[in-house]
Image (cartoon, grey):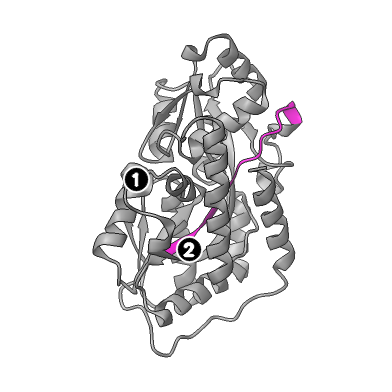
Amino acid sequence: MFLKAPRLALAAAALAITGFAAPAIAADYTPSNPECIAPAAPGGGWDFTCRQVGKTMQDLGLIKQTMQVTNLAGGGGGVAYAEVVNKRDSDNDLIVAASSATATRLAQGAYPGNDMSQVRWLASIGADYGVIAVAKNSPYKDLKSLLDEVKKDPSKISFGGGSAVGGWDHLKVLIAAKADGIKDVRKVKYIAFNGGGEAITQLLAGSLQAFTGDLSETKGFIKSGDVRVLAVLAPKRLEGEFANLPTAKEQGIDAIGANWRGFYAPGKMSDAAYDFWTKEIAATYASPEWKKVMEANGLAPLDLQGADFQKFVKESVAQIQGISKEIGIIK
């Protein structure tokens, strides 16, 4: 039930893309010092979202200045969320990278005293499918053999990812484990890091047996040959340069994990600033330049702005609460 709705949303969003949006101009607001907070260490998915969107916006002339990217790691995004809510609640020049991991933490009450209504949800810029990967010299050649080892002795396999325990990277592994018949998924070992890049570093150092993350943050390590993807958590094989990566589904494990990517803004951002950022992110998404970024990084279509994106996030939070209760992460 949890997986069906996001898949439908992705399909509907793909059908909704019929043309390119014209760059919007808000007469009473122009950012003087545009900034994007990436709520994790450099190298992860949130960092990718800020830097790639900021660069594309500037290349398209949608913003005049370079987008400043601030990495604010901690608490699975909670440090950044609290910073925005408590200290920068009226900053019109600020946007913050968000994803399914953000919705997961909000759903599980992991940002103490905070909820999704305290910020304004701007727009999505695509969806990033999850991967489960190992180091190039790993003895595990496919996802089935790795999960079979977990069934034999859960203590032998440590998964690592860039979200906190119970976060989206963790949930992706649990979804795959459950789909493969592992009944008590609480026994699956997961180690949290402050970003996907840090988790992959530990994988390559031999501290982990497997990595759980998203394709965008794994891409460089796949190309270098340091990391081998056992499975993409997509309904079918991706197109383009990632077409050779196997899905979990084709290995008999019906596990789908699409990580949407987008932005939220301070809760008291002015309507003029909110309108500017929403429309300019939409214009970025619709551009040929962004389509190339999506193709190069394995992003799937997800085109939602303003009220539609707000509704989507609200539904995602409710869905994640349901699966988290089912597997015992929350009561």
The kind of residue on which mark 1 rests is: Ala
Residue 322 in view: yes
Residue at image location 53% in from the left, 57% down from the top: 314
The kind of residue on which mark 2 rests is: Val
Question: Closer to the N terminus: mark 2 or mark 1?
Answer: 1
Is residue 210 found inside the magenta-colored segment of the image?
Answer: no
What segment carries the magenta color? 250-264
Residue at image location 47% in from the left, 33% down from the top: 329
Q: Tell me residue 22's x, y (percent).
A: 59, 81
* Left or right relative to 198: residue 18: right
Assess disc 2: are there few (<14), some (14-19) or many (≥20) residues with their C-alpha within 10 Å of its C-alpha.
many
Place residue 11 in its image quadrant. Answer: bottom right
Q: Which element type, helix, strand or loop, lies under badge 1?
A: loop
Residue matched to label 2: 53
The relative height of residue 133 versus residue 150 in the rendered view (above or below) is: below
Residue at image location 53% in from the left, 64% down from the top: 310
Q: Nearer the viewer, residue 227 or 18?
A: 18
Residue matched to label 1: 41
* Left or right relative to 132: residue 67: left
